[in-house]
Image (cartoon, rainbow, N blue to C red):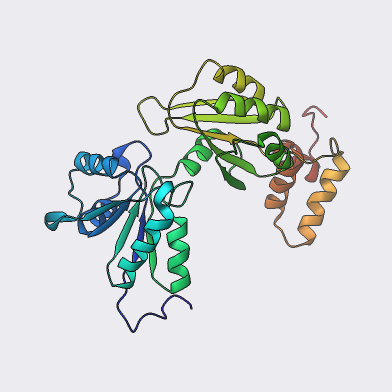
Amino acid sequence: MVEGDRTAERVGTLTLAGLPIGNIEDAPPRLLRVLTESRVIAAEDTRRLRQFATRAGVRPGGAEGARIVSYYDANESRRTEELLTDLREGRDVLVVTDAGMPGVSDPGYRLTAACAAEGIPVTAVPGPSAVTTALVVSGLPTDRFCFEGFPPRKGLSGYLTELAGERRTMVFFESPHRVAATLAAMAEAFGADRRAAVCRELTKTYEEVRRGGLAELAVWAADGVRGEVSVVVEGARPAGGAATDEQLIAAVAALEEDGERRKDAIARVAKEVGVPKRRVYDLVHGIAADAGE
């Protein structure tokens, strides 16, 4: 069944709403409106939702009030069935989590997948995400990245070994009391000098972004880290040693023959080989490295 098969009968709409990850001023007007209009709200932490609504100056459900139910890891399976019943019977459902988007290392995926399977409409109120926020402030490449969530508690070494060759920038979540050990394990698996950034308390009063090699960051974190933590790690560079000038020129030429613009081809080769873009540009255009030549 594809979405829209239920148009003959009135079904509810599932709305996934992203709450600010720290700064309440990041809440968009649409979020405040849907909180006021929703009659059924599933919240990861009902107490924190009410605190947020009070600080934002809105009342969930407006004058009539909303039915607010808890929706967290331990009850997600059971609650999903209850919320599906609401939706089948024509009641709209709003899902919010403590911070960020539902479904991104938070409850929400299971209900969304069930709605998609039944053709129940799903929409979202986009909001701040710790994943992209950490990525853009890390100072690491942003053109290609992957989100790995929380590293596993068991089998961490093997898990990281499998990621050692990942070429994209990687974004992880980690609890503050485990981040030092995780950084040390990353240094072992990825290399002590692999660049990374530890992003702590993003958008909050004590926001901090610490950048450096993994081993250096592990030593720093050993003294203790507080607050919500995201870790961004540089992707692996291509194996095989340094490329020669001729190889760099040939790589750009091959991309151009495939239809890629020279400017884009130069940038791509520089990134993939791990050399300055200016060097590749100069080689392709025949500019001498020494201005005096």
Corner quadrant of residue 183: top right
Corner quadrant of residue 214: top right
Residue sticking out furthest to the top = 223
Is residue 143 something one can see in this rendering?
no
Q: Quadrant of the C terminus?
A: top right
Residue sticking out furthest to the left = 63
Is residue 253 something one can see in this rendering?
yes
Q: Report the front residue among 78 and 258.
A: 78
Q: Residue at x 79, y 32 (%)?
A: 289
Q: x, y percentage for residue 217?
A: 60, 22
Q: x, y percentage for residue 160?
A: 68, 37
Q: Residue at x 35, y 36 (%)?
A: 22
Please state the total of marks drawn on the protein image. 0
Q: Report the front residue among 64 and 141.
A: 64
Q: Is residue 285 left or right of residue 148?
A: right
- Please, is residue 38 above or below residue 169 in the view? below
Q: x, y percentage for residue 182?
A: 61, 29
Residue sticking out furthest to the bottom = 8
Q: Residue at x 67, y 37 (%)?
A: 155
- Please, is residue 225 above or below residue 32 in the view? above
Q: Report the front residue among 166 and 73.
A: 73
Q: Is residue 196 left or right of residue 266?
A: left
- Please, is residue 28 above or below residue 120 in the view? above
Q: Residue at x 50, y 31 (%)?
A: 175
Q: x, y percentage for residue 136?
A: 51, 39
Q: Report the front residue among 261 and 42.
A: 42
Corner quadrant of residue 6: bottom left
